[in-house]
Image (cartoon, rainbow, N blue to C red):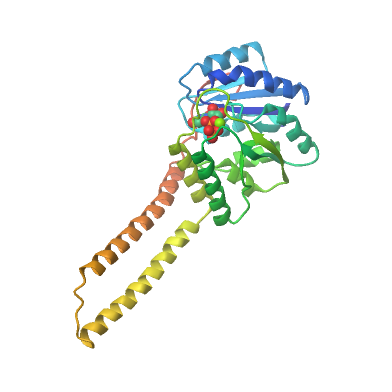
Amino acid sequence: MSPTKDISIIVPVYNEASNIDELYERLLLALKEITQNYELIFINDGSQDDSLQKLKALSVANDQTFYINLSRNFGHQVAVSAGLDLSNAQTVVIIDADLQDPPELIPQLYAQHKNGFDVVYAKRVSREGETFMKKATSKLFYRILQKITSFDIPLDVGDFRLLDRKVVLALRSMPEQNKFLRGQIAWLGFKQTFIDFKREPRKHGTSGYSYGKMFSLAFDAVTGFSDKPLLLVSRLGFIISLVSFMVILFAIFSHFVLEQTITGWTSLIISSMFIGGIQLLSIGVIGEYISRISTNVKNRPLYVISDSNIETND
Ligand code: UDP
Ligand code: MG
């Protein structure tokens, strides 16, 4: 089925009631420069404020505005995936609801698409109004990810980007349950380019990305796109076994040949703590992968829609 719209704007919404009106106005202005054949898809990801009422009101006022109300909070990546699944346009733009990603950049993203690029992402040259901890952890995370994956995941890039329909269809066919869209899109390839932008501080409200959510995204990114932690663990195991073997040889030698038995409690406790720690760490890493295997084997739906004004086939 070929898409009926030129462009679809996908906005995940989690407690963004105070940002929705301004976002909507600015999106419409930006779209004026591109096309009138658009659709706005807002995904309400279990907001506790009156985001949903606002979205419903918008969809009544403008029949090119749609909402997908998820049955609970499924997280940002899943909310975006729901939007991608239900979009019906030649190009798709993913944008945050908190106005950290300026809608005014959309015409520039679109222009690059016209130049023949399938993925156009917006690269943050600066980030304002974010805590030092957030910037530092995110910088470190991207650098580590870069080191341990075998393909290039662009640095300092969020999910604010334009995708051609080809890319959207390819993403829909990727079955993984632990979504890390930036990684998946990088893995897919296609013709990619970027534009620079200054990331604004969040307009209203507070970040819905707790450190807990950030860490689980980071773990999904690493385990989804790299086997290096597993390799590292087995190499570590190998090296430690080698060292232990030599220590054992030395112990036997000193017992039988030098005939001086070691009375050291310190060395004993250090080595047992060390081996114990390494073992726990290794089991933990293996556990992370196994838990993801089990999630994927269960094959539950990625999200559950409570209600929506988008026509689906059922
Ligand atoms: N968001 C979501 N579900 C969540 C957390 C966030 O849909 O569980 C949305 C949020 O409304 C925003 C976008 O994802 O549109 C980015 O979230 P946020 O601004 O809180 O993250 P940050 O910019 O602080 O990384
Ligand atoms: Mg934000």
Does 249 appear above or below 52? below
Return the x and y of residue 314 as percentages of the image width and height. 56, 24
Residue under the image location 70 percent in, 39 percent down? 196
Of 242 and 40, nearer the camera is 242
Does 61 appear above or below 225? above
Res 38 visible: yes
Residue under the image location 23 percent in, 87 percent down? 258
Left or right of 187? Residue 38 is right
Q: Residue furthest right?
A: 115
Of 199 and 88, nearer the camera is 199
Return the x and y of residue 234 as percentages of the image width and height. 42, 64
Of 139 and 175, nearer the camera is 139
Picture mark count: 0
Res 314 visible: no
Does 122 appear above or below 291? above
Left or right of 140? Residue 4 is right
Does 270 appear above or below 295? below
Return the x and y of residue 121 as percentages of the image width and height. 68, 39
Q: Residue furthest bottom?
A: 257
Q: Quadrant of residue 82?
A: top right
Q: Quadrant of residue 123?
A: top right
For the N terminus, which image quadrant?
A: top right
Return the x and y of residue 76 as percentages of the image width and height. 52, 33
Q: Quadrant of residue 30?
A: top right
Residue under the image location 26 percent in, 84 percent down? 253
Q: Quadrant of ligand 2?
A: top right
Left or right of 199? Residue 251 is left
Residue under the image location 60 percent in, 32 percent down? 85
